[in-house]
Structures are given as C-alpha cells and as structure tokens.
Image: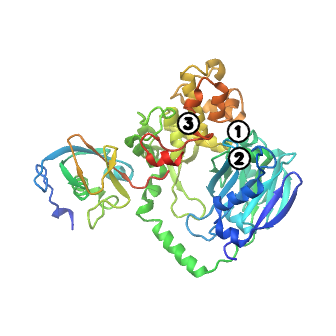
Amino acid sequence: MNADNLDITLTRGPDNSATVQITVRLFGTARRAAGMTHLEIAAPARCSELQLARLIQSSIPSLVGPVIDIDTLRLKTSHTFNLNGVAFIDGEVELRSGDEILLFSSQAGG
Amino acid sequence: MYGYHGRALIVDLSAKSTEWEAIPESILRKFIGGTGLGAYLLYRHCPAGVDPFHPDNPLIFVGSPLVGSRLTTSSKFAVLTKSPLTGMIGDSLSSSFIAVEMKKSGCDALIIKGRSETPTLLTILDGEVNFHDASRLMGLDTFETETKVKKQIGHWTRVACIGPAGERMVRYASIANDGGRQAGRTGTGAVMGSKNLKAIGVRGGSLPDVYDPDGLNEIGRELSRRSLGPATEKYRTLGTLANVAVFDALGTLPTRNFQQTTFESAQEVSGEEFHETHFVKNSHCANCTIGCEKIVVTTDGGTKKQGRMEYESAFALGSLVGVGDPNAVIRASTFCDEMGMDTISAGATIAWAMESFERGLITLEDTGGIDLRFGNAEAVIECLQMIAKRDGIGNLLAEGSLRAARSVGGGSDAWAMQVKGLEMPDMSLVRSRRWRWGWR
C-alpha cells in the first residue's frame, strides 16, 4: 500500500458522515520531521486511528518513516494519538470541529 | 554460584576495618540484586530506630547479577540507607561504570558503617581496601573531586563522591559518579557526608562466572538490536526532555509548586527547544546502547555552562519554579550536579518557599533580600547556592520542604509537595491516576 491509494474524502467520511475541522499538534520527532508545530485538517466526524494517520501523512509526507510506517501507513508503535489531551485514541473516535489531536511518543517514562 | 560472588564487603569507617560477609545463595535467589538485595541488607544491618545521620546507619551500594555482563542498560547500582528525608528506606539508582568495578572487586554489595573522625577517601583497588585522608578534597565540587581522586589513584579508577552539599548534609544531597551522573534521590549523599566519607575509588579484578556465556551473549546482541527499535525512539531523539511539551499539552506539567498543570513558557524549556538551541551531544550510561542523556549548553551572553539535562531537572528547575529561560534551567541543573544535590527535591523545596513567599509567610528579611517570587531565575540560583552552603535561608531549605514547612508553620505544610518527606517528581496528580496510586 502507498500514499497514492488513499481514499481521503474531505467533504464526507468513508461512511458518508460529515467532516469536521480539527488541529493536529505535533511533538518531538513528529515536529522535527514535519518542520511545523501543528496543522489544520478536515477529518471524518467518525474517524479511525488508521484514517487519521493517512490524512496526516497526506499533508506531511515527511512523517512517513519516522512516525508513520512506510508499508502500512499506520502510526508506528513508537507514537500515539491523543484527543484534546484527555483520551488516547485506540480504534475509532468521534470528532467535533475544533478538536485537537496530539501526536507524540508512546513512551511516557521520565 | 553464577552471576554473584556470594559475599558483601563491610567497611567500618570508625574502626578503619573491613570484613567479608557471606550472602547465601538462597538470599540471592530471593532478592535479585539492586534495590531488592539492598533492602534485605539494610534490614539486616540497620538498627531499629537509628537516626539517619547516626554512624550505625549503613550506606549500602548494591549491584545485580547482570552487572558487567554487557547486556544493554544493565550496569546499574543501587544505594540504600535510612533516608534523612523520610526516616524510612531510601534507595537511589544510577547507571555507572563504578557498578562494574565494584563487582570486579569481588563483592555483590559494599556496606559502609561508622563515621570517620577526619574526611576520608576510601579506595578498593584490586580487592585491597585503604583509607586515605581527604582533607584536601573538602569543599571541591563533584567534578573536581572525581578528577583529583583519579589523579591520585589512577585514571582507570571509577569514583563515587559527594560535593559540598553532601559535606554539609543537605538532606537531599546526592552521590555523583561517572562525571556528573547522580544517584540523586532520598538523600544518600547526606548520609555519606555524615560519615565523613568524601569519595570512594574502585578498580576491580575479575567478574564472577556466568552459567551460559554464549547464551548470554546471544541475548545481549538481540537486546542491543531491539534497544534501537521503536520502543526507545523517544529516548534516542529528544530523550526524557520530550515530556515537557507533551505533559503541558496533557495538563500534567507541574507548574508553580503544582498550583497549575500547564505552563505558558513550556515551549521555551521543552525538549524541542533544548534540542534546537542548546544540544551538544547524546551521552551514554555504562554499557548502554540507547544514549538517552542530552548534553546541553547555555547560549546566552552569561557564564557558559554545559551539563546533562533530563525531564525531571527541566520541570523541577523550570515550570515548577515558574522559570521559562532554558539558559537559567541549564545553569541551575548543572550547579546542582556540581554541588551534589537532587534537582527534584531542590526545585520542589524552592517552589514551596516561593509559594510561602507569595503568601507572606516568608519575607524579604527571611530571604536576605531575595525576591523569591515564581519566575525569578536569579533567585533560584541564589537559593541553590545558599542551600549548598547552608547559608541564610539555605539552611532552612537544605532540610527539605516538609521540615522547612514545619519550621515556618502557618499551614505551609499544605503546599509542601512531598510524600512522607520526599519531594514528588514528574507529573501532576490531578490528571494522572497512575501516579495517584503510586504515591499513596
């Protein structure tokens, strides 16, 4: 699978659901690879972790490799998504306009 | 017996004598090295009810069966003693080449008892123990001390030592080793200071046999390979400093003595900023392939300082005291390493004092004119200097936040952010259920 095969619908989600405007905030390796601190994207209101990873990599291809797996285009196990600093995303998530997705390392140790 | 020598070396500083104590295999199987074996030995050698600064309180260095094996990240030692902060079991860990040399010296643990009448350098060279006068080392910082000891007894000697804070028994003094690395927590350096023991120099002989050297080497190669995979990605890039910006976004970054959980200047003291503007190189602990430690340097016009930086030091001397200047954080953290002080307890005790100052319980007269408000980076450095010397208000803050709060009164123990006397590290408890349970 590669980025050319992506089905990214910016007006309707894959289940025909509405899309919402969200902010993706990048930390650590993701920020360094992207060269930016955040980006605004349109995402399906009901969105999976896999869809999120593909939407983000379509805007920032440089994340493929360091953060997103080059073969599956899934988020690598070294990284994780968090919604609004409150809940880690595992599987599907309901998104609302204005939500923030945080993308950072999955290793929490200090 | 494999992986162990099956004995501990007991050094009595009062009598200037040594003895060996056998550790039965059944005990070594039950308490597998490090903190576990150290807790057993502390239970065995520490008299009930003893004051932490009494000569009878033992200071115990303990390795593990894997030390010296070259398995990545395995070369650690634990230091155990009755903590002068908590009055309970105190343990502190450090990854260090001295762990390997201690094991080469033929002991699984080094138990130090008594108190020397004069400042002492203890050397264990190829199994031979000697006591040297250390008067000339007194007052030197940890870096200077290590350099002088190596010059005296040999470059390949590994050194554990205290700085001026340990000499003055600052209750959260640390034990430095391997050029500024610290066994930082619970005040083990203060106990070392109470024994008049300035430094320990160790150079070993041979390691104990292992059961299956080829099998161990194979596991070692696989662990080294895995240690460079996704599970350690953060540590190999920004290191633990990456936590600053993430914890801020999660609302778990302790700020202004835990009064807030986000910091408006988090970006300035984040791992991203340190890496972009202050990064010098990665540093590796003994026998570690990961290299999570970041060496950083100041970049402003002030006196140049270079040192190690971890998340715990960055938050304790940054957001916790309201300081958003990365150069000030580097200076404060490096100064703690030089003096031999735990950055977490030092920062947390100053944060308590800052809140007490802003609430009017500590005055300008008390501080000797220091405007001890959150965010005053110069005040943090001044306080650290006074703590290391036990000078002025530093004498109060050298006791740690709980004892200082009890001395000042006015209900200030309510914002002494400690548990049983030990200042809390890491993360706001408001949003972290994990830590809430951990600190009960």
Left or right: B204, with B279 as reference point: right
Give the Cα separation between the discs numbered 3 and 1. Answer: 18 Å
Instruction: Residue A66 in the image: state x and y as whole percent.
Output: 35, 59
Of the numbered discs 3 and 1, the one sitting upstream in the chain is 1
Chain of the residue on which disc 2 is drawn? B
Q: Amino acid at mark 3?
A: Met
Q: Is residue A13 visible?
A: yes
Looking at the picture, do discs 2 and 1 lie on one chain? yes
Left or right: B201, with B400 as reference point: right
Q: Circle 1 is placed at which residue position?
A: B170
Q: Secondary structure at mark 3?
A: loop
Looking at the picture, do discs 2 and 3 lie on one chain? yes
Q: Is residue A78 above or below residue B192?
A: below
Of the numbered discs 2 and 3, the one sitting upstream in the chain is 2
Image quarter in which the C terminus of chain B is found: top right
Q: Amino acid at mark 2?
A: Gly
Image quarter in which the N terminus of chain B is found: bottom right
Q: Circle 3 is placed at which residue position?
A: B417
